[in-house]
Amino acid sequence: MVKRMKSRLGKFFKLVWSADIHGLASEISFTFLLTLFPLLVVFVSLIGLSQNPKTINLITDQLGKILPAPIFQPIDKSIENLTSVKDYKILGLSIIFSFFSSLTIFGAIIKSLRTISNDKTKTTFLFSQWMSLRLMIVSAILILIYFYSSYGLYIFEKFLFKSGKISLFRRNPEIFLSFIAFGVIVSLFSFYYSYASNKKIPLRECLPGAAFAAILWLLLTFGFQYYLRLKNVGVNYSFAYYLLSKMVVLMLYAYINATFFLWGYVWNQTRLVKSQEIPITD
């Protein structure tokens, strides 16, 4: 057992190095930051089809209960500004532009996963856009599931507190939301790992790496929260970067999460190397 794990870890780190995982993670995180606002426009527009601005802000506030404050605040401010837009012509044009520009991040994800799996199959421009669109649709569905599940939990907690003064969720909302987030992230990453490459992999075989990456995401999220609450840490960031401090923290958070996401895919690939004799690139 120990020998097998040691061999797998050796393959894992060899593939991390040979595929330049951290360079790919930099590309994903940079693209994510460029497309973050367009993604928010699409997301808020989807929720806005059935909810009013006040409810949208309440729904998205559930994300702030699990993400570190400096990371959530720029997102929350953008959503708040979007919900206050009254010019529907401008909003309509923004949605169209945002829809196509936000496909870029999914293209970067597909490119990274295909590089890791050594998938050199050539695809047409239209087919690559279809792959990105498919990832976007599934991502939107799963993210909406998270927000509405967390919002439903918030409403249920209000009912419990009002009827029986039960405040367990109110005291520790991040614990309960972590279970919802974990399920959504595992589902999301599993779908990416399975469908982003032409080498189709059954979803169940993608679960180990997705769970591995999701656990690392939770540890990073709570670790960031603890780190940023340390005395003088927030002050030092603000002093060093002033208004850019929140963006610096967001960039670092996005980069580390992109690295963990790719690590999860690499972890699955090390198992496929053994079972299907997929070569590790040198």
Image (cartoon, rainbow, N blue to C red):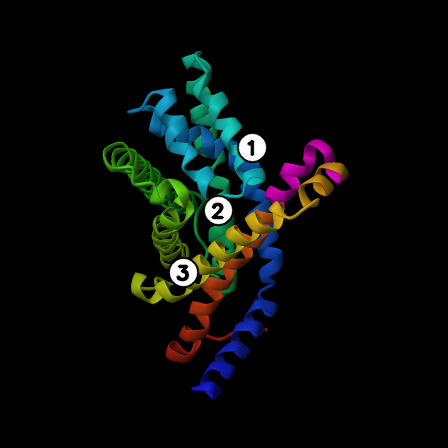
Position of the N terminus, as image quadrant, is bottom left
Nearer the N terminus, badge 2 or badge 1?
A: 1
Let me know if residue 163 is in the magenta part. no
| Type of amino acid under label 2 | Gly
The residue beneath circle 1 is 74
Classify mark 1: helix, strand or loop: helix
- In the image, residue 23 lies at what x, y percent? 62, 57
How far from the left and from the top, in percent, is residue 32? 54, 42
Instruction: Say which element carries label 3.
Output: helix
Q: Mark 2 highlights which residue?
A: 107
Residue 218 or 99: which is nearer the viewer? 218
Q: Amino acid at mark 3?
A: Ala
Q: Amino acid at mark 1?
A: Pro
- Part of the protein shown in magenta: 240-251
Is 209 drawn above or below residue 240 in the view shown?
A: below
- Whole-angstrom CA distance, mark 2 to mark 1, is 24 Å
Q: Earlier in the sequence, mark 3 or mark 1?
A: 1
Element at label 2: helix
How far apart are the alpha carbons under marks 3 and 1? Answer: 27 Å
Q: Does residue 119 appear in this view? A: no
Are the residues flagged by discs 2 and 1 in contact, CB closer than 8 Å? no
Can residue 172 be seen?
yes
Residue 203 position within the rendered picture, expressed as x and y whole percent measured from the top left: 31, 61
Query: How far apart are labels 3 and 2 at the CA level?
Result: 19 Å
CB of mark 3 within 8 Å of CB of mark 2? Answer: no
From the viewer's perspective, is the residue at label 2 or at label 1 nearer?
1
Please tell me the numbered disc located at residue 210.
3
The question of residue 246 being in magenta is answered with yes
Q: What is the chief secondary structure element of the magenta stretch? A: helix
Decide which of 121, 192 is in the foreground and name it: 192
